[in-house]
Image (cartoon, rainbow, N blue to C red):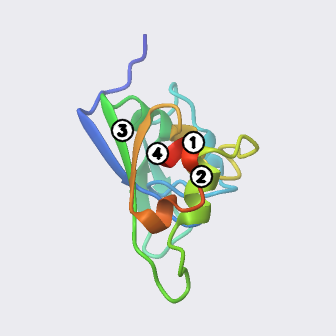
Amino acid sequence: ESNLPVFDLCLIGVGDDGHVGSLYPGRDEVLVGSDGPWVLPVKMKEPPSITLSLPLMKAAKEVVIAACGVSEKYPKGKSDAMRRAISDENETLQSFPAAGLRDVATWVMDEAAASALGDKYTN
């Protein structure tokens, strides 16, 4: 039994680098367990910010991750990020934090973001 609060819904965006909230690859904050703090300081940005811990995100009754949009820099949108987050078994919390939500999340994305996933995930 966890002592974490339970949100009804946790709607989360994901970055091209796999960050969710302000939990970034290679940072220790992503490894905080359910016995750790629920809200974490993020001092790597100016101004500093806060983020929810991954266990708190995962504890929500419903976790929805949304990814969409294309740009000049990313003409295929977040397709590689979605492939890594959803289907790449080699990704870890440290290398791609969004992978830590794959077992609890409903993934909502546009066609561009889903384009690298293949038929197993898109049909």
Which percent across, then down, holds residue 20? 48, 54
Q: What amino acid is found at the position of numbered circle 3 in the picture?
A: Val
In the image, which disc is placed on residue 23? none
Dot 2 surroundings within 10 Å: few (below 14), some, or many (20 or more)? few
Location of residue 6 by image quarter: top left
Judged from this view, the residue extending furthest toward the bottom is 72
Tell me what residue is drawn at x 47 percent, y 76 percent: 46
Q: Earlier in the sequence, mark 2 or mark 4?
A: 2
- Residue topped by disc 2: 118
Q: How many marks?
A: 4
Callout 1–callout 4 Cβ contact below 8 Å: yes
Q: Give above or below for 8 relative to 96.
A: above
- Residue topped by disc 1: 120
Classify residue 35 as left or right of residue 110. right
Q: Give above or below for 5 relative to 80.
A: above
In the image, which disc is placed on residue 63? 3
What's the CA distance linking mark 2 and mark 4?
8 Å
Q: Earlier in the sequence, mark 3 or mark 1?
A: 3
Q: What amino acid is found at the position of numbered circle 4 in the picture?
A: Asn
Q: Give above or below for 90 relative to 14.
A: above
- Residue topped by disc 4: 123
